[in-house]
Image (tube, helix red, strand yellow):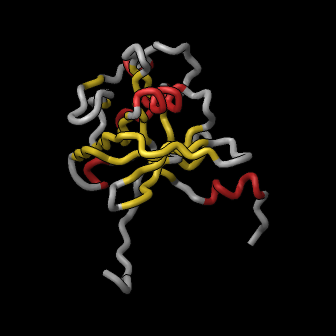
Amino acid sequence: MKEVPLNQSVKLITPRVTALITTVDKGGNVNAAPYSWVAPVSFSPPLVYVGIGGKHKHTYINAKDTGEFVVNIVSEDFGQQAVNCEEQHSPGTNLMEKHGLGAEPSKKVGVPRVRESRSVMECKVKEMVEVDGSDHVLLIGEIVHAESEGGIDDVKPLMHDGGRKFRSVGKETELERGNN
């Protein structure tokens, strides 16, 4: 094995699921931003985290102000549109609309979800964790409603390797586990 520079070591945890996180600001304007630092935290209560690249991001500000966000899993068929939502923009600019994505009302939160998403998790902010010296903030949300069109082969989530590289989900492998 070769030594990996420490500032690159987190890239060893790849690929990661790509999600379009939707929030609304105090004025009700929708914000959508793609993230791949998204993962479960707990089964009970059901918690998920999003790693946000700083407190200046609209996602952070909006979630802190309103206490809600939606995790919309990005599928291959709208991946480019979702990734286009990472462009720099002024508050209030609706990047979902600009890039041809639809919004529809959520069931339990006031933040809309992405119509094209086949798997969504509506969340209430549980905690925002700021780690001293870190360049990211952890947004932890409790899932209050979730819907999916099926399993991983139905949803076809877009996985992020890093940078411009994405991939599809590959072959399933079953392994024996002691507790299952």
Q: Residue at image x 40%, y 33%?
A: 67
- Residue 116 located left or right of residue 169: left
Name the image quarter holding the C terminus: bottom left
Image coords of residue 23 (percent x, y): 41, 28
Residue at the bottom extreme of this rendering: 178
The answer to which quarter of the image holds residue 136 is: top right
Image coords of residue 124 (percent x, y): 36, 40
Looking at this view, is 14 or 167 the one in front? Answer: 14
168 lies above or below 43? above
Image coords of residue 106 (percent x, y): 24, 32
- Residue 56 located left or right of residue 8: left
Residue 75 seen anywhere in this rendered image of the structure: no
Image coords of residue 163 (percent x, y): 62, 41
Residue 8 seen anywhere in this rendered image of the structure: yes
User: How many marks are shown on the rendered structure?
Assistant: 0
Q: Residue at image x 25%, y 44%?
A: 145
Q: Residue at image x 38%, y 79%?
A: 175
Looking at this view, is 73 or 80 the one in front? Answer: 73
Q: Residue at image x 56%, y 46%?
A: 129
- Residue 2 located left or right of residue 36: right
Name the image quarter holding the N terminus: bottom right
